[in-house]
Image (cartoon, rainbow, N blue to C red):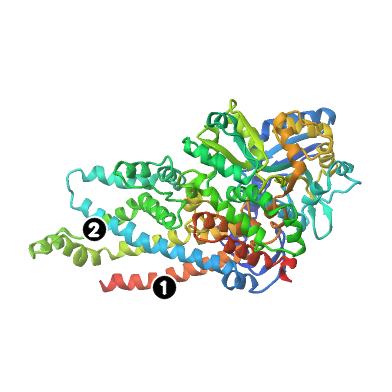
Amino acid sequence: MSLFVAWPLLSALRYAFFSFKGVAPDAFVGLANFRDVLTSEPYASWTWRALWHNVIVFTSLMVVQNGLAYLIAFALLKGLPGHRVHQVIVFLPVVLSAVIVGFLWKLFLHPMFGMVNAALALVGLPGRPWLGDEATALGSLIFTNAWHWVGFPALIFLAGMQRIQKETLEAARIDGANDRVLLTRIIWPLVAPATTIIFTLTFIGSFNWFELPYVMTGLNGSPGGATDVLGLYFYRTAFGNTTSGLQDFGRGSALAVLMFLFIATTCAVALRYLRRREIQL
Amino acid sequence: MLKRIGRRMLAATIAAGVLFAPALAQAGEVTFWTWRQEDRAAYAELFAEFMKANPGITVKFESFAVEQYATVLSTALAAGKGGDVIHTRAYGGLEQFAKAGYLLALDNANVPELANLGDDAKASLTLRADGKVYSYAFASQTLGLYVNNEVFKRAGVTPPTTWAELIAVSKTLKDKGVVPLANGMATAWMAEVFTSVFTNPLVGPEFSADLLSGKATFSDARYVGALTKLLELRDYMPPGFTGIDYPTAQQLFLSGRAAMFAGGSFEIANFRKQNPKLDMTFIAPPAPQVGAPRLVSKFFDGGYAVNAKSSNQADALKLVRWMGTKQFGDRFSALLGNISPIKGVTIADPMLAEVAKLNETSAPYITAVYFRYDSPTGSELLQAGIQKMMAGSMTPAEVGASMTQGITRYFKPFQK
């Protein structure tokens, strides 16, 4: 098993230090591939742009998707009428594959035949090419991702909330705590382990983001790189885009190594902080 | 314990190798690797003819998803596997495999049928470093303008021959509630095709030679001027064209909601299949003014190569030689609706014959023919730039400058 895990990682690491003669490794070039993707134009601009988009995706998902999930979990916890049905409904999109969700929302957001523009037209608002406009393309993808995944953090938060002793919540209520106080002062610290899991999964998911942008806006991160993220950029560089690019395993491997180091380091640091936070709270 | 683990791992590795390694052909069997899954039936027919003429050789058709083909192929070739005869791309797409030493060089001794190809076809499949041909060209493609005759007739307009006519015709069509031009910008490679269709006549026949000699770059006034003209077309493209992808554009044209479609001759067979009743013509794009040449953009799709590690090279070469004959070219064009580059081929289909005639006034599809050999490719740079330019977030001069800057990394004539 270790062989299957370690071998690809090690070969990517090795290829990152080689130049390529076509698709075959050629000469050892030291850190040249890393220098290219980090400092040499146009690769550097593409790398930093993709990384910046990943940061936006992660931040937005943490706030919008996971924030909403927290509120949904609380609503479900309260056991309002119909909460069981809603629990299933919220979780339902999670079981769909990203490819299906991507195609579905690509259709909904279609500038001429899409449901979203049709709905806007009904209320007299102008439609727009959501995925073809640099200002809205990334936001549309983030929204789709949130629609797809919101049930998952909601379920984790709900499980975390259900572990809180009823007496604790009742005591807070008796002391006059309203929903806002409960959510921010009582429940939030007590679901810290759930937050750690959600943060970690969202971070890894956001920085490895690939399927949804690939299906909805293509390998180039259209329009004009507005939805380009590290996953697409790495794939395009290493394996080539049949309609425009070449296979460049050297620079592609360098990107893969950098992505791995970035994700692993940030996760390790964040986990250390979050674990300490769990204990403190 | 360690010994046992080692033995188990060895056994697992061997099992995986046996299970997953795409075996090279057995004696008398030639495997043909391709990304053209949709051409399976046509190739079955073609190969049946070959097998009839060459008893003792069987050809096995193996296809892979187009998006993964290059990856699957490079992995297999690196491991000494892969098909005996391999469908390859042209230009840079071929060079990366030839450069690595994975393909057999073809010459007049092992494939005398190379004499049946024109110089441009051979050049498209030549490794520039050693000047040798590594693949036998299978089709040329032409980029131009599709016209829906019925829609034009209904609107009372005729196909445009100059840029001014294109704008006038588009205006009339739009006034009559028809989308003049089906194309959108969401599919990057189609945005590049769209650019070449309209800019090639505008930049003129000498532009590509000037680029190659370094006399001009993409910042040249001719190129920037041509890109600027493209902006005029935005009013005649579908609403929200920046979000209109390739399949939508095709459907708009096929359904008659749009009157024109800028695309390649590779669409003909597909368009006919999807709407057999469609009355369409493939025309050359409009000239900048009356009397100027209406240049279509021409390029070669790819070729048939022989795996350098094939254990059945003699039979593989036999197949490639057969695919270089007029007999094959005639059948290929008839069955697949593509123009075979083999000299003297008879093209029976009237529309395809018309395309072949248009090729007499052609210019290279510049970014694909000359600038897909090194990274960043001209296509990558143009695709990103043109999407931004048509959306209004980049100027034509900035697109030209970004292409020049990216290509200057490796293209010596620009480094002067």
Q: Quadrant of residue B246?
A: top right
Q: Which residue is mark 2?
A: A161
> Which is more toward the observer, B305 or B325?
B325
Q: Numbered disc 1: what chain? A: A
Image height of B273 relative to A253, above or below: above
Q: Residue at x 68, y 41 (%)?
A: B284
> Which is more toward the observer, B171 or A275?
B171
> Which is more toward the observer, A185 or B179?
B179
Q: Amino acid at mark 2?
A: Met
> Which is more toward the observer, B168 or A63?
B168
Q: Indicate left or right for A151 with B370 as reference.
A: left
* Residue furthest front as drawn: B290
10 Å crowding of disc 1: few (<14), some (14-19), many (20+): few
Q: Is residue B339 visible?
A: no
Mark sitting on residue A87? none
Q: Do tags 2 and 1 sit on the same chain?
A: yes
Q: Indicate left or right for B197 with A119 as reference.
A: right
For the residues labelled 2 and 1, the Cα–Cα distance comes to 26 Å
Percent across and percent down for residue B197 are 64, 47
Q: Numbered disc 2: what chain? A: A
Q: Residue at x 13, y 61 (%)?
A: A178
Image height of B96 relative to B163, above or below: below
Percent across and percent down for residue A192 are 29, 65
Percent across and percent down for residue A238 are 61, 59
Q: Amino acid at mark 1?
A: Val
Q: Is residue A157 visible?
A: yes
Task: Name the quadrant of the C terminus of chain A.
Answer: bottom left
Q: Which residue is mark 1?
A: A269
Image height of B25 relative to B379, above or below: above
Question: Cβ–Cβ below 8 Å for labels 2 and 1?
Answer: no
Determine the secondary structure under disc 1: helix
